[in-house]
Image (cartoon, grey):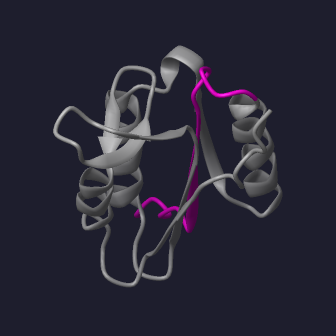
Amino acid sequence: MRAQMARAISLHVGVDDLEGAIDEACAATDRAWDLGYETTTLIAWRACAGPVVDAIRDAALRLEAGGAFLLTLAARREADRDGRGGWRLHDRVITDDELDDLRSWFRPGVTVAIAEPAPMPLG
């Protein structure tokens, strides 16, 4: 008997150098759980590029057509050393190009959504 494939997986990332980011990641986890997603949350020092990439790769391997993957990022927008835009994780910037490449790992027919929190007011 073949193991049942996941239908909806979510990953929620909260980097601790952004005020409210950990709370936002935890709240997004709760919302996704309520919607039936299998959830993973990476916050504070766990919000590093390696674990984020590994979690996305795992989801891409497990989801089939008709499945859904949701990534929420509560992190700062920043450029890497080469000037490419991306998200500041705990250890480095994961660039938009890297996220596009990660998105390509999913099978055709899997819905992939990357969401960011609403901008927080300054001051």
Q: Nearer the viewer, residue 122 or 25?
A: 122
- Residue 5 horizontal/vertical position (percent): 47, 64
Q: Quadrant of the C terminus?
A: top right
Number of disc labels = 0
Indicate whether residue 35 is drawn in magenta: no
Dominant SS type (magenta): loop
Indicate whether residue 11 is drawn in magenta: yes
Residue at the far front in the pictured view = 123
Residue at the far top in the pictured view = 45
Dividing the picture into quadrants, the one containing residue 99 is bottom left
Dividing the picture into quadrants, the one containing residue 65 is bottom left
Q: Nearer the viewer, residue 69 or 71?
A: 71
What residue appears at the point 69 percent right and 33 percent down from the top-left corner? Answer: 21
- Residue 19 horizontal/vertical position (percent): 72, 27
What residue appears at the point 78 percent right and 32 percent down from the top-left corner? Answer: 23
**Left or right of residue 15: residue 58:** left
Q: Which residues are magenta?
A: 1-19
What residue appears at the point 75 percent right and 36 percent down from the top-left corner? Answer: 26
Q: Quadrant of the N terminus?
A: bottom left
- Residue 112 horizontal/vertical position (percent): 46, 70
Q: Give above or below for 43 relative to 26.
A: above
Q: Nearer the viewer, residue 11 or 66?
A: 11
Q: Give above or below for 2 relative to 81.
A: below
What residue appears at the point 39 percent right and 30 percent down from the top-left corner? Answer: 51
- Residue 28 horizontal/vertical position (percent): 74, 48
